Image (cartoon, helix red, strand yellow):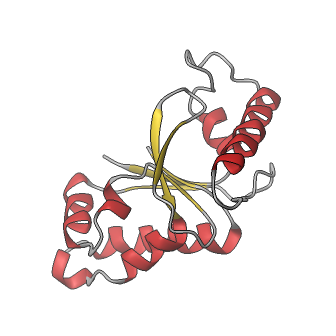
């Protein structure tokens, strides 16, 4: 069952086993430093810089979406790549959809939270029978954009 987590990447990695290729680094300061270094490296590689809230007081929220509802939403999307490919959406007005190694040395597709929100808003909930899942994901995408927070699909 896909789980969606809205909040800082530092908190995500701290609560999900740490960073590094063997996930051994679980110290909060080490994780925060790794996230900062990764963001700096990422911004050097992209056409323009992305920024998001990594403060320890950043909001954090999670929701699970059933497999059936997730599949229905992906099928109903006009641009399903914006839903199916990314496992991380970063805030900001960009149309990037790219693949990069994350803080666990795993390849991860990254998309735009603003693009995700636009895509979710095109889906008619009555047609897909996933009103609750769609509403929860729209709320997460909206908060990602509004509060400049990453959204992770776990």
Depth check: give the residue in front, 91 or 136: 91
* Residue 90 pos. (x, y %): 58, 58
- Write the residue at 38% across / 75% down: 119
* Residue 154 pos. (x, y %): 43, 43
* Residue 97 pos. (x, y %): 46, 57
Depth check: give the residue in front, 48 or 24: 48
Judge from the rendering whether residue 113 lies leftward or rightward of residue 40; answer left or right: left
- Write the residue at 60% across / 73% down: 93
Where, by quadrant of the figure, is residue 107 drawn? top left
Above or below residue 121? Residue 77 is above
* Residue 53 pos. (x, y %): 75, 57
Where, by quadrant of the figure, is residue 25 drawn? top right
Judge from the rendering whether residue 135 lies leftward or rightward of residue 18; answer left or right: left
Judge from the rendering whether residue 45 lies leftward or rightward of residue 76; answer left or right: right
- Write the residue at 73% across / 59% down: 51
- Write the residue at 27% across / 59% down: 70
Above or below residue 78? Residue 66 is above
Judge from the rendering whether residue 56 lies leftward or rightward of residue 3; answer left or right: right
Where, by quadrant of the figure, is residue 13 drawn? top right
Above or below residue 26? Residue 38 is below
Tell me how many marks there are: 0
């Amino acid at each position: 069952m896909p789980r969606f987590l809205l909040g800082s990447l530092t908190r995500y990695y701290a609560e999900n086993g740490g960073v590094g290729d063997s996930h051994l680094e679980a110290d909060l300061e080490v994780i925060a430093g790794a996230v900062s270094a990764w963001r700096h490296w990422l911004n050097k590689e992209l056409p323009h810089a992305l920024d998001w809230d990594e403060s320890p007081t950043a909001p954090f929220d999670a929701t699970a979406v059933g497999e059936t509802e997730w599949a229905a939403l992906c099928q109903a999307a006009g641009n399903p790549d914006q839903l199916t490919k990314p496992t991380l959406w970063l805030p900001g007005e960009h149309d990037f959809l790219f693949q990069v190694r994350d803080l666990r040395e795993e390849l991860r597709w990254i998309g735009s939270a603003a693009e995700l929100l636009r895509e979710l808003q095109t889906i008619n909930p009555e047609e897909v029978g996933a009103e609750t899942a769609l509403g929860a994901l729209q709320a997460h995408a909206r908060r990602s954009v509004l509060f400049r927070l990453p959204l992770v699909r776990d």
